[in-house]
Amino acid sequence: MHEASLALELLKITQGVLAEHGGSRILRVKVAVGELSAVEPELLRYAWEAVTLESPAQGSVLEVEFFPARQVCPTCGPVQRSPGSWLPLCVSCGAPLRVEGGDELDLLEVEFDVNGEKS
Ligand SMILES: [Zn+2]
């Protein structure tokens, strides 16, 4: 399962951040998930809950910021489409479209506790 290994990876990174700053507990983690990254935000939250049990991140909040992909026409610019559906060609001029963005998969923020103080 993609989300489970990703959650483990995130935990490893956030624990590294925690150790580096001498924090005691992870409170909140924010990640960017692109539409094309094949990560289901809901599943990732479940996986996070599971892998953080008995860790300094237990009970922490995983926030997922979703980034949709954009289809762009070389002549007309970004093209409107409904989420989850793809246009083969530009609706205005018929040119092939390219895809921009949507492949994000990044750790954006880690909020942790240092001696009872938020940081
Ligand atoms: Zn066009």
Image (cartoon, rainbow, N blue to C red):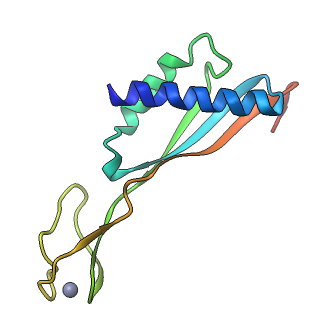
Name the residue at 54% across, 32% down.
10
Query: Viewed as shown, does residue 9 lie left or right of 95?
Result: right
Name the residue at 62% across, 18% down.
58
Query: Viewed as shown, does residue 15 lie left or right of 42?
Result: right
Q: Position of residue 118 (x, y in %)?
A: 81, 35
Quick check: 2 above or below 41?
Answer: above
Q: Position of residue 83 (x, y in %)?
A: 25, 58
Name the residue at 88% across, 25% down.
115
Name the residue at 33% across, 61% down.
69
Q: In the displayed image of the protein, which residue is found farthest to the top? A: 54
Quarter containing ligand 1? bottom left
Query: Viewed as shown, does residue 108 lie left or right of 7?
Result: right
Camera-nearest residue between 19 and 30: 19
What quarter of the picture does the N terminus occupy? top left
Quick check: 74 above or below 10?
Answer: below
Q: Position of residue 5 (x, y in %)?
A: 42, 26
Query: Viewed as shown, does residue 95 lie left or right of 4?
Result: left
Quick check: 79 above or below 119?
Answer: below
> Count of labels shown?
0
Q: Position of residue 106 (x, y in %)?
A: 52, 47
Find residue 99 and report its image quarter: bottom left
What quarter of the picture does the C terminus occupy? top right
